[in-house]
Structure formats: C-alpha cells, structure tokens
C-alpha cells in the first residue's frame, strides 16, 4: 500500500492528470476485495489493480472517460461512485457485485506542448520541467526525443505526421512550434489556425525571426485564412532579452510564457 501512495505522489508532483480508483464494497464472488486500488492516467493503467481482466478494463475505460469529461470542471463533480453487477454490467461469469470510488486529480495542470525536440526545444524543456507544469513533446525523430531529460512531467511522442497531433491537444494548452524549420512549422500552424474557432489556445508561438513571421503571414493568406489570424501567434517567441544561445532563448521564452499564464 505504501508503494501505491508513492506512485500517487509521483503523479501529483509531476502534475499528471489521473484518477484514483478504489473498491469500497463487494457482494458475492468478486476478483478483488474492498480496499484494492489503482491509478489511471490518460494513457491507461499507471499502477495497481482492481481485479484484472474485464472488470479492470471496464474501470480503466470509466476512469479515462471521467478524466476527459466536462463533469470534472465542476468542483463538486470530481468524485463519483459506480455500482456494477459483474454479470450484467461487466460481462463476467462471477455472480457478485462491486462498488468503486473514482477521484480525479491534477486536471487543471498547466499543459505545455512543444513540437520539435532540437537543441532549443531541449533547453526549453529542461527549464520548463523545473516549473509547475506538464510538457508534451512531439517529434518525428526518436533519436532527438531520446536526448530530452527524463521526467514524469514530460511525455515524449514520436509521430510521422505532426499536424495530425493538433486534434489531440488538450484545451487551454500553451503550444510552441520549434521543429526543424519553416517547412515543418507551417503545416502545424495552419492546422491550428484552421480549427481556431473550435479550439483556441491561450498561447501559440513559432520560433524564428521577424522575416519568418512575414513569410508565415503570406502562408496564412495563401491558405485562405483571414489576416486577423496573424495576431494569434508570437513569432519571434520570447521576450527581447539575451542572445541566440539555446539556454538564453529558453529563458526568454519561459519568461513570456509566465507573463501570458499569469494574465489569462
């Protein structure tokens, strides 16, 4: 049981959204007794068990659905009980029933999404991990993702088509485009802007110069998007401090992110 709470503290410290699931009562034949616990994140089972097999699969799905639902935006709706007949509700041959308690944690974490894992992104992420936030990094190159620091607060995702990841971004994320260059930043930016009315972000930035910004404005016009979208992102990113060393670029960007976060 001590290890369970150590894992729970690990998730809390890492600002990872998760659900604690506990069996609080049982009747009849059941695979696990009352008191059994597990932790579930957006990715699935993190630690523990409530019986394995069909009941655990169902409980994980229930926890993930609860984690992503609008219910948890209400303070008094961050916990719930469910009563399942293992035969009727779960499809098991056991004749018993189980009552489970679900409790959500960390759903208001500061989410930062970084597209790209190059030198500047690496320096930025290393600095961000010292703050109270959760970072997701997407890149096409596994070898560059492997160079990023290890942390329970960092999720590394290798994907071939970076624009496809836009639809999966959590609402209210701070999004930074720091890929290999204009060719790979452009399609991600356009995908975000095309869906802006449905999913706006409090911060959107593209690494680069003022000349790159002008080129991106042209790309936006050629894509048939209104010129008002030019004002939705920062390029260059960061405050006007420091030089072009990755570490100083990271400091200038983090300073801007903190400014925006505290003004939202």
Image: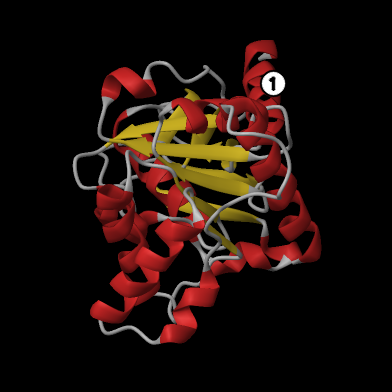
Extreme residue toward the right, this view: 262
Q: Which residue is more in the foreground, 94 or 81? A: 81
For residue 27, say whether it is visible.
no
Residue at the spot 47% in from the left edge and 20% down from the top edge: 148
Residue 115: name its quadrant.
Answer: top left
For residue 2, say whether it is visible.
yes
Residue at the spot 51% in from the left edge and 63% down from the top edge: 69
Rendered-image quadrant of the C terminus: bottom right
Give coordinates of residue 44: x percent, y percent: 40, 36
Query: Mark 1 = which residue?
Result: 5
Give coordinates of residue 119: x percent, y percent: 46, 25
Extreme residue toward the left, this view: 160
Residue at the spot 64% in from the left edge and 44% down from the top edge: 253
User: Image height check: is 219 above or below 125?
Assistant: below
Secondary element type, mark 1? helix
Q: Which residue is more in the foreground, 76 or 263? A: 263
User: Image height check: is 18 above or below 232?
Assistant: above
Rendered-image quadrant of the N terminus: top right
Extreme residue toward the front, this view: 211
Q: Residues within 10 Å of mark 1 (few under 14, many from 20)?
A: few
User: Image height check: is 81 above or below 1?
Assistant: below
Residue at the spot 19% in from the left edge and 40% down from the top edge: 160
Give coordinates of residue 209: x percent, y percent: 49, 52
In this rendering, the count of numbered labels is 1
Give coordinates of residue 15: x percent, y percent: 66, 37
Task: Give the colour scheme of this rendering.
Answer: secondary structure
């Amino acid at each position: 049981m001590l290890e369970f709470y150590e894992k729970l503290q690990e998730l809390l410290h890492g600002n990872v959204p998760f659900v604690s699931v506990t069996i609080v009562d049982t009747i009849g034949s059941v695979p696990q007794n009352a008191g059994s616990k597990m932790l579930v994140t957006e990715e699935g089972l993190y630690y523990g068990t409530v019986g394995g097999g069909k009941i655990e699969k169902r409980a994980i799905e229930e926890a993930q659905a609860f984690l992503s639902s609008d219910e948890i935006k209400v303070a008094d709706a961050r916990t719930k009980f469910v009563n399942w007949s293992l035969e009727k509700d779960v499809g098991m041959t056991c004749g018993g029933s189980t009552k489970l308690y679900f409790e959500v944690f960390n759903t208001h974490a500061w989410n930062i999404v970084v597209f790209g894992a190059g030198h500047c992104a690496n320096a930025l992420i290393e600095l961000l991990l010292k703050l109270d936030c959760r970072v997701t990094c997407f890149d096409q190159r596994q070898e560059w993702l492997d160079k990023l620091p290890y942390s329970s607060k960092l999720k590394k995702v290798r994907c071939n088509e970076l624009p496809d990841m836009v639809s999966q971004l959590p609402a209210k994320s701070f999004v930074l485009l720091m890929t290999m260059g204009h060719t790979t930043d452009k399609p991600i930016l356009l995908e975000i802007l095309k869906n802006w009315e449905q999913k706006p972000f409090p911060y959107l930035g593209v690494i680069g110069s003022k000349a790159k910004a002008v080129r991106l404005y042209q790309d936006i016009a050629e894509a048939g998007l209104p010129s008002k979208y030019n004002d939705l992102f920062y390029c260059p990113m960061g405050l006007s401090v420091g030089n072009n060393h990755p570490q100083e670029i990271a400091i200038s960007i983090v300073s801007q992110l903190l400014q925006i976060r505290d003004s939202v």
